[in-house]
Image (tube, rainbow, N blue to C red):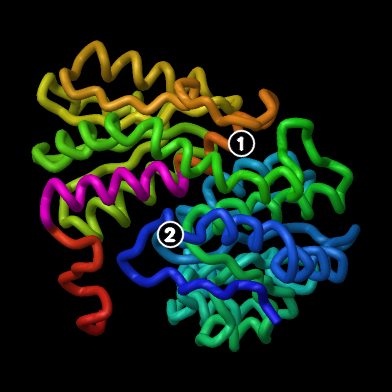
């Protein structure tokens, strides 16, 4: 029986639940890790030619750090929207492909269809989800790696990347093992405590801005997309544009004026110089450069070589989640509110 005994994260609850540290342990050990190891051991081998990461909206964006980690894999990795996956029917789909699907609540119909489509074409599928009593889990035949909360999800995705790379003897020295990942719970909480005043100030500027750009490079592009598309546009009805660090400097930057709010996520991975360049431009031409640089964080207990990965997991989960909660407080618009989602057919 799965060890998760705490309340499953609900819609509108974005992270940092009371049992978060235990959720992180669960995600990187026990049944979740055993499911991942069994899946990788059964299906990844010399015949594997491609790995697809499949999801919709935030579940797709949250693959950002994992996709970056899997660039160390000799096997190509492709992240694709669930409906696009079915409509485009990639030539690589078949028994030689692995599919990692993600749906937080398991109720995303397009992802259930993509899982069914993949399995019909002989591809093994692992679902990342909160539980197995839902449409996506049934489509996946119960092959589910569980998580609860955004912090645990990022830890789980990193653990999956580690196991895939380990099977190929391709684990880089900078990628933490599941044993290291399971101990990160206190680091998530520490980060939000250290940055809480700064996140409060940034949230107030976002709430007052007519629009905001959100920039991240490398593994932090997914965090930028999640924060802009999910937290700001979907949940707060605020105009927000996500951008990759270098893409920002190839067109989007022309929209920047002194009054433009730009959030820049600067991590400690190999793409840091790109994020620093975007931050320097923003500080030069805007009076509202809202830069979060992970080098300011203590990350107690984290080995120096792991800070790049851990900073990406922090940005993709607790940092943007806490920032969203502060935006919610500034706008007085609940993060659970929607105009169309769950209310109309589309």
Image coordinates of residue 234 in percent, x first then y, are 25, 60
Of helix, strand and loop, which mostly describes the magenta segment?
helix
**Which residue is at a point 12% across and 19% down the rendered structure image?**
258
The answer to whether residue 86 is above or below residue 293 is below
Q: Secondary structure at mark 2?
A: loop
Q: Decide which of 33, 274 is in the foreground and name it.
A: 33
Tell me the residue that label 2 is attached to. 17
Q: Relative to 51, does residue 304 appear above or below in the rendering?
A: above
Q: Nearer the viewer, residue 97 or 133?
A: 133
How many numbered marks, from 0 up? 2
Q: What label does residue 255 carry, if any? A: none
* Residue at image location 52% in from the left, 82% down from the top: 113
Q: In this rendered view, identify the residue nearer to me: 173 or 79.
A: 173
State the image coordinates of residue 112 (x, y, percent, origin top left): 52, 81
For the point 45% across and 40% down, the residue is 315
Figure quadrant of the C terminus: bottom left
Q: Residues within 10 Å of mark 2 (few under 14, many from 20)?
A: some
In the picture, residue 334 is in which quadrant? bottom left
131 w.r.t. 213: above or below: below
Q: What residue span does the magenta drawing correspond to?
A: 316-332
Q: Is residue 146 left or right of residue 267?
A: right
The answer to whether the residue labelled 2 contacts the one labelled 1, judged by CB atoms less than 8 Å apart, is no
Q: Position of residue 295 (x, y in %)?
A: 49, 21
Q: Nearer the viewer, mark 2 or mark 1?
A: 2
- Give the vertical position of 163 relative to 283 (above or below): below
Give the residue pinned by disc 1: 309
Query: Whole-percent x and y of residue 213?
Result: 25, 36
First in residue order: circle 2 vs circle 1? 2
Q: Report if residue 330 lies within the magenta region.
A: yes
Asked if the stretch drawn in magenta spans residue 324, the answer is yes
Residue 322 lies left or right of residue 221; in this view the side is left
Pick whichever, 55 or 155, lies toward us.
155
């Amino acid at each position: 029986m799965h060890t998760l005994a705490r309340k499953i994260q609900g819609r509108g609850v974005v992270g940092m639940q009371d049992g978060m540290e235990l959720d992180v342990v669960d995600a990187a050990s026990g049944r979740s890790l055993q499911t991942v190891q069994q899946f990788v051991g059964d299906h990844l081998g010399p015949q594997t030619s491609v790995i697809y990461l499949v999801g919709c909206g935030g579940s797709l964006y949250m693959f950002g750090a994992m996709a970056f980690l899997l660039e160390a894999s000799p096997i190509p990795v492709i992240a694709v929207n669930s409906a696009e996956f079915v409509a485009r029917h990639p030539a690589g789909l078949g028994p030689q492909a692995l599919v990692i699907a993600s749906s937080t609540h398991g109720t995303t119909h397009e992802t259930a269809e993509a899982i069914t489509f993949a399995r019909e074409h002989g591809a093994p599928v692992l679902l990342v989800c909160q539980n197995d009593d839902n449409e996506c889990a049934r489509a996946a035949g119960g092959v589910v790696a569980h998580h609860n909360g955004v912090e645990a999800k990022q830890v789980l995705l990193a653990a999956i990347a580690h196991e895939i790379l380990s099977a190929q003897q391709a684990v880089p020295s900078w990628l933490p093992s599941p044993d290291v990942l399971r101990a990160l719970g206190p680091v998530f909480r520490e980060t939000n405590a250290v940055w809480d005043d700064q996140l409060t100030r940034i949230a107030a500027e976002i709430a007052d801005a007519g629009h905001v750009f959100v920039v991240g490079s490398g593994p932090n592009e997914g965090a930028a997309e999640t924060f802009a598309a999910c937290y700001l546009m979907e949940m707060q009805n605020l105009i927000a544009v996500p951008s990759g660090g270098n893409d920002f400097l190839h067109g989007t930057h022309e929209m920047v004026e002194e009054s433009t709010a730009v959030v820049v996520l600067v991590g400690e991975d190999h793409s840091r110089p790109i994020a620093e360049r975007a931050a320097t431009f923003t500080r030069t031409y805007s009076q509202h450069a809202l830069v979060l640089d992970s080098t300011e964080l203590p990350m107690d207990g984290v080995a120096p070589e792991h800070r790049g990965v851990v900073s990406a997991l922090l940005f993709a989960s607790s940092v943007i989640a806490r920032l969203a909660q502060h935006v919610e407080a500034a706008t007085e618009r609940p993060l659970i509110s929607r105009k169309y989602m769950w209310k109309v057919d589309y």
